[in-house]
């Protein structure tokens, strides 16, 4: 089973500043990596797939990078509506599909 | 518009059984692999099970293997999860989710339902 490890667990960022979230896989997943955003009381929403492709309707301030075992989600200029928990997920080597434990993004 | 609507979540006693349903609309249902993903209260996401577009392939997380059964009825655009031998560790919001690519296994999840809460408690 591929273990996905996200860091940090909690990230506090000021509005308008850059937020950088990390995800590490225990073995290579190629580019089969997705990022999801989950706001309180809501279902997860797909943000990024293929490590770096934005899903339909996702603002350009969200970007993904990386391949193999190291991945990054960057929010270039944090908006108040970006407050959420962010999960990475690998879909290269399954079952199981595995998620990271999440990074909670807070406003500083 | 793609919609996935889960139902069936209730309070059930330990050792009990339950069937969850997910009603789908807005896409060609029998072209897509579907999943169940769960989230215990205040915790992260855990993949539970998948079923291929034609129902011919199913896979399970080790934590539910032998206790849960995934199925689908393509004539009714519905996905199911039969759950048995439930324990407190199965308490969670259960989401159904759709894979993005048709006739494919192993892709991102582009749509999720709103979830249904299963509580296992005496």
Image (cartoon, coloured by chain):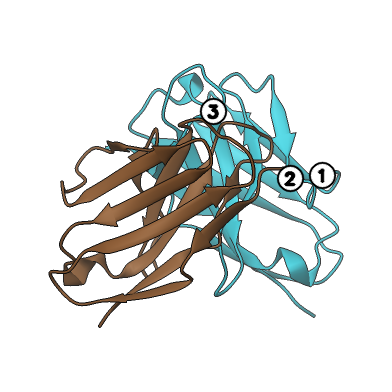
Mark 1 or 3, nearer chain start: 3
Between B116 and B59, the one lying in front of the other is: B59
Do labels 3 and 2 touch, CB within 8 Å? Answer: no
Q: Quadrant of residue B110?
A: top left
Do labels 1 and 2 touch, CB within 8 Å? Answer: yes
Mark 3 or 2, nearer chain start: 3
Neighbours of disc 2 within 10 Å: few (<14), some (14-19), many (20+): some
Q: Judge from the rendering whether residue A61 lies leftward or rightward of residue A3; answer left or right.
A: left
Q: CA distance from mark 1 to mark 3?
A: 19 Å
> Mark 3 belongs to which subunit?
B
Between B16 and A29, the one lying in front of the other is: A29
> Mark 2 belongs to which subunit?
B
Q: Position of residue B80 (x, y in %)?
A: 63, 41
Q: Which mark is residue B65?
A: 1
Chain letter tied to cyan: B
Residue at 45% across / 26% down in the picture? B29
Q: Secondary structure at mark 2?
A: loop
Q: Judge from the rendering whether residue B70 lies leftward or rightward of residue A81; answer left or right.
A: right
Q: CA distance from mark 1 to mark 2?
A: 6 Å
Q: Is residue A3 above or below residue B34?
A: below
Q: Secondary structure at mark 3?
A: loop
Q: Position of residue A66 (x, y in %)?
A: 40, 40
Between B3 and A38, the one lying in front of the other is: A38
């Amino acid at each position: 089973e591929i273990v996905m490890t996200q860091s940090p667990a909690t990230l506090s960022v000021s509005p308008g500043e850059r937020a950088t979230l990390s995800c590490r896989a225990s073995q290579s997943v190629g580019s089969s990596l997705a990022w999801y955003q989950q706001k309180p009381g809501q279902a997860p929403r797909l943000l990024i797939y293929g490590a770096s492709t934005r899903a339909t309707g996702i603002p350009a301030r969200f970007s993904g990078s990386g391949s193999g075992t190291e991945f990054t989600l960057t929010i270039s200029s944090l908006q108040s509506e970006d407050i959420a928990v962010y999960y990475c997920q690998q879909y290269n080597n399954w079952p199981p599909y595995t998620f990271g434990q999440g990074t909670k993004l807070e406003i500083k | 518009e793609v919609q996935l609507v889960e139902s069936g979540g209730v309070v059930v006693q330990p050792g009990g059984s339950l069937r969850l349903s997910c009603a789908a609309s807005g896409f060609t249902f029998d072209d897509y692999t579907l999943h169940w993903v769960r989230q215990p209260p205040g915790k992260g996401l855990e993949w539970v099970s998948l079923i291929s577009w034609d129902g011919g392939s199913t896979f399970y997380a080790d934590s539910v293997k032998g206790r849960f059964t995934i199925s689908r009825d393509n004539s009714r655009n519905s996905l199911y999860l039969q759950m048995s031998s439930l324990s407190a560790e199965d308490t969670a919001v259960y989401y159904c989710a759709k894979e993005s690519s048709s006739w494919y296994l192993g892709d991102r999840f582009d749509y999720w339902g709103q979830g249904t809460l299963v509580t296992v408690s005496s």
